[in-house]
Image (tube, rainbow, N blue to C red):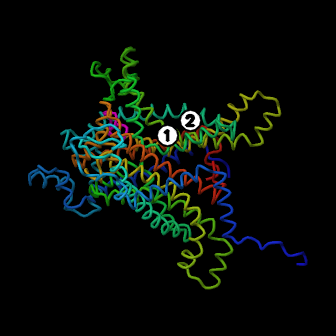
């Protein structure tokens, strides 16, 4: 069978994301309707009057049949209406949008940290199998998945903030002495650079380092493991032996021949890693008082603010589906064989 | 056969398994250590109340916020409760949540996975689609949403943990059953008059079980982490019940003022428990299926 052209593959993969999105929407719909008792009363909050409850029952369509309710729900989602938060008084959508950049900045900083550490470690372990480096990487990898993120965060705060005093207090994205840079992307690191304010950049970076490292340590283990396994598999293949026998320098063999091929399994693992990262994000944000959507959801949970929690779950799920789509599209771009087997 | 009889009878499967286990343990001291640690945790879970030196709920204002001393090895919290006792007593709840959740998802995942792999077709398509939908969520966040929707209780923490682990079991069992569906012994079982249910329950499932043990052990650690994470953000277990996640959360406020023992000791024990199950899983994998080692 001839390989379909790249645009067709990309289109096919984008279409394949739709069932996932539909599944996510159905499941979140079931979650909002699974509330014990009267969902309208839950969404209106404990202090609501009978009229307010009735009004919410009308807008949610709770007196109609389930399929009808579902279409009303989808219609509201399409209009971007996730309901209003009881605690902030704003719409859930605007709450989430203002907090999302903080979470994204933290997640990507964490991912960057673990990639820059995990890939060299994995390569090192694969080039010297069964050496002390290999064993150390194995122990680090097993210990890494055993670490409760919230505990690692607190440990780092105790050692680096309380004992050594080399990082600022773990209270949010910026010290109160500074004000946020003019918002362009919402990511403080990029915005402060765009504004040309290096001092602000350092201030934001020093606040970001500890939570990002905490988050990254958790993702380190699966990435280091898969890098090692992929490199070992590639290094024992015939074309590497040929390349070595042809007298190519070992760094060329290692990086432009072996590593480029090992990159594919690493990218596939990124999907699982993102599931970890987005989940641990919530815990890390709570530990470091990071003003992202995770800590927003935690305070909403405590206050029984259901619209906010469901909006958060939906946002995270859609983000995750989107990230997986992005990974697969990159995969198609990198690997000319992608899509041939399936 | 005319050759001379062997000097000793060939080892029975059980003997050779024990011999292999002994070989693996001597090769892998770490796994043996993990097994001992596991034993200690089981002891704590069963007899925690009797082992703990103090009552985990009795406060004593006279010794509040005391750092570790000879009479309070792990120190005391803001109400003067003994942290060591609380950590020991919490073992039953933390392990209990994880064991019940993993058992539930293993049971349900076995049924779904075996059906999907054995029948194929629409059964497979529907089950796989449901599993894919669960997998479309970041799992910890789905657990948060489930507990929020079902109600904030310990039982719902268990259900949520079971649901987010379901895809793992369903997928692994499905693929294991799929590779064995056409095997000779399944055909033989069918020809000798077994019905579908008997083939699935007595011929397919027992063959899948050893591989699943590895996954269960690795998954236990993750389930403990997950449940502790949920109670850390204030879901499920309520204070003053001793539980590792909630103890870390309560101690977190004291970290920046230097009272480290409130959060660090429960966190360390939590980490040790997860580490123990992960090492056990690795060891079991070497024992049962060395090919899976990476």
Q: Earlier in the sequence, mark 2 or mark 1?
A: 2
Q: Is residue B150 magenta?
A: no
User: Which residue is denoted by mark 2 in the rendering?
Assistant: A118
Q: In this view of the protein, can residue A19 be seen by the observer?
A: no
Given residues A22 and B70, the one toward you in this image is: B70
Position in image of residue B219 (x %, y %): 49, 55
The chain letter under disc 1 is A
In contact (CB < 8 Å): disc 2 and disc 1: yes
Q: CA distance from mark 2 to mark 1?
A: 9 Å
Q: Residue furthest front?
A: B70
B150 horizontally vs A163: left or right:
left
Position in image of residue A334 (x %, y %): 61, 37
**From which residue to which does the magenta span run?**
A283-294
The chain letter under disc 2 is A
Q: Is residue A286 magenta?
A: yes
Helix, strand or loop at disc 1? helix
User: Which residue is denoted by mark 1 in the rendering?
Assistant: A219
Helix, strand or loop at disc 2? helix
Dot 1 alpha-carbon crowd within 10 angstroms: few under 14, some 14 to 19, many 20 or more: many
């Amino acid at each position: 069978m001839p390989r379909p052209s790249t645009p067709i593959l990309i289109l096919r993969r984008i279409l394949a994301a739709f069932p996932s999105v539909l599944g996510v929407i159905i499941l979140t719909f079931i979650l909002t309707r699974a509330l014990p008792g009267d969902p309208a009363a839950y969404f209106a909050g404990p202090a609501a009057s009978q009229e307010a409850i009735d009004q919410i029952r009308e807008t949610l369509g709770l007196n109609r049949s389930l399929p009808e309710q579902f279409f009303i729900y989808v219609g509201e989602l399409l209009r971007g209406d996730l309901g209003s938060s009881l605690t902030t008084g704003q719409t859930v959508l605007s709450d989430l949008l203002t907090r999302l950049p903080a979470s994204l900045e933290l997640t990507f900083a964490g991912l960057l940290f673990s990639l820059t550490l995990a890939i060299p470690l994995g390569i090192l372990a694969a080039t010297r199998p069964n050496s002390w480096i290999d064993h150390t990487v194995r122990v680090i990898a097993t210990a890494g998945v055993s670490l409760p993120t919230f505990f690692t965060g607190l440990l780092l705060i105790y050692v680096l903030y309380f004992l050594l005093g080399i990082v600022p207090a773990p209270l949010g994205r910026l010290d109160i002495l500074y004000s946020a840079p003019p918002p362009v992307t919402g990511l403080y690191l990029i915005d402060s650079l765009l504004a040309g304010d290096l001092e602000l950049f350092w201030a934001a970076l020093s606040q970001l380092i500890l939570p990002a490292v905490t988050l990254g340590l958790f993702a380190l283990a699966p990435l280091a493991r898969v890098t090692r396994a992929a490199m070992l598999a590639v290094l024992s293949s015939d074309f590497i032996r040929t390349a070595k026998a042809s007298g190519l320098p070992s760094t060329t063999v290692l990086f432009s021949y072996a590593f480029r091929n090992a990159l594919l399994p690493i990218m596939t693992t990124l999907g699982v890693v993102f599931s970890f990262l987005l989940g641990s994000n919530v815990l890390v944000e709570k530990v470091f008082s990071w003003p992202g959507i995770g800590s927003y959801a935690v305070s909403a949970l405590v206050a029984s603010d259901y619209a906010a929690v469901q909006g958060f779950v939906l946002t995270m799920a859609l983000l995750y589906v989107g990230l997986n789509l992005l990974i697969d599209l990159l995969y198609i771009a990198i690997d000319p064989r992608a899509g041939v087997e399936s | 056969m005319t050759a001379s009889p062997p000097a000793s009878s060939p080892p029975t499967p059980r003997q050779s398994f024990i011999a292999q286990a002994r070989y693996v343990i001597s090769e892998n001291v770490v796994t043996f250590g993990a097994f001992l640690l596991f034993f200690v945790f089981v002891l704590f879970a069963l007899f925690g109340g009797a082992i703990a030196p103090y009552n985990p709920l009795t406060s004593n204002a006279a010794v509040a916020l005391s750092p570790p001393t000879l009479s309070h090895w792990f120190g005391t919290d803001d109400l003067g409760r003994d942290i060591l006792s609380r950590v020991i007593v919490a073992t039953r709840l933390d392990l209990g949540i994880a064991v019940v959740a993993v058992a539930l998802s293993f049971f349900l995942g076995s049924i779904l996975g075996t059906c999907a792999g054995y029948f194929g077709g629409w059964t497979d398509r529907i089950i796989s689609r449901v599993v894919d939908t669960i997998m479309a969520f970041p799992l910890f966040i789905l657990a948060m949403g489930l507990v929020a929707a079902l109600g904030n209780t310990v039982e719902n923490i268990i259900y949520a943990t079971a649901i987010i682990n379901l895809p793992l079991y369903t997928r692994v069992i499905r693929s294991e059953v799929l590779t064995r569906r056409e095997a000779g012994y399944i055909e033989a079982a069918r020809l000798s008059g077994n019905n579908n249910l008997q083939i699935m329950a007595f011929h397919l499932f027992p063959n899948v079980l050893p591989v699943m043990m590895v996954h269960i052990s690795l998954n236990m650690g993750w389930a403990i982490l997950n449940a502790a994470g949920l109670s850390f953000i204030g879901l499920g277990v309520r204070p003053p019940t001793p539980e590792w996640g909630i103890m870390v959360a309560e101690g977190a406020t004291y970290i920046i003022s230097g009272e480290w023992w409130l959060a660090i000791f429960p966190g360390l024990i939590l980490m040790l428990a997860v580490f123990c199950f992960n090492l056990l899983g690795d060891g079991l994998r070497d024992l049962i299926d060395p090919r899976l080692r990476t």
